[in-house]
Amino acid sequence: MKHASDSSEQQTAESYMLEELGRKLGLTLQSSKLKLTTGNSVQIDGLNEEKQVLCEIYARIGKLKSAQSDKVASDFLKMLYVEKTFGCVWDKHFCFASEEAAASLQGQSWLTMAAKEMDVTIHVIEPSTAITESLVAAQKRQVMVNKSS
């Protein structure tokens, strides 16, 4: 039996979504640790250095909660930091597993406006039925872990 906080389902979904996004964009995206000119490194969900493409993936089914929206904002900031550090424009993409989750970067929020202003393209790539079902089951299992007082 899996530990309640196990995130292997999200990792499987992210791999699927990354491959599909790469197919959609017509290039290869790889999860990579990118060494910055500042000496720092950042983990990027999807990277193609040759074409200067950055992608962050968020594998969640359903609406995001506050802390999850903060994670999206953090990933968004990471892409902007990479772009600023290298001193050139990168093609930036954010990929969600559901329309409800993508709503965090759509609508009228400040984060939505920032994403538009900074040219971040939003994608929704819904995983297969089997992957979606495993994500929903994992999210239920993980909620039980987070309910401590």
Image: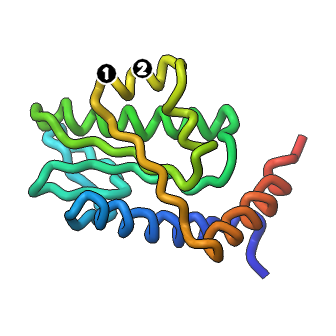
Q: Residue at x 34, y 53 (%)?
A: 44
Count neighbours of disc 1 (C-alpha within 10 A) and say few if under 14, some if 14 to 19, many if 20 or more. Answer: few
Residue 51 placed where, x, y %? 12, 53
Q: Is residue 62 left or right of residue 57?
A: right
Count neighbours of disc 2 (C-alpha within 10 A) and say few if under 14, some if 14 to 19, many if 20 or more. Answer: some
Q: Residue at x 42, y 48 (%)?
A: 123
Residue 12 placed where, x, y %? 53, 72
Q: Residue at x 70, y 70 (%)?
A: 133
Image height of 127 relative to 56, above or below: below
Q: Amino acid at mark 1?
A: Glu
Q: How many marks?
A: 2
Q: Residue at x 23, y 67 (%)?
A: 28
Q: Secondary structure at mark 1?
A: helix
Q: Quarter of the image for the C terminus: give it.
A: top right
The image quarter containing residue 141 is bottom right
The image quarter containing residue 15 is bottom left
Residue 104 placed where, x, y %? 56, 33
Marks 2 and 1 sit apart, C-alpha to C-alpha, by 6 Å
Q: Label 1: which residue?
A: 117
Q: How is the image coloured?
A: rainbow
Label ID, residue 113: 2
Q: Quarter of the image for the N terminus: give it.
A: bottom right
Image height of 79 relative to 84, above or below: below
Q: Nearer the viewer, residue 9 or 98?
A: 98
Label ID, residue 33: none
Q: Nearer the viewer, residue 40 or 94?
A: 94
Residue that sits furthest to the right in the current view? 149
Is label 2 in contact with label 1 (beta carbons under 8 Å)? yes
Residue that sits furthest to the bottom in the current view? 1
Image height of 109 relative to 28, above or below: above
Q: Amino acid at mark 2?
A: Met
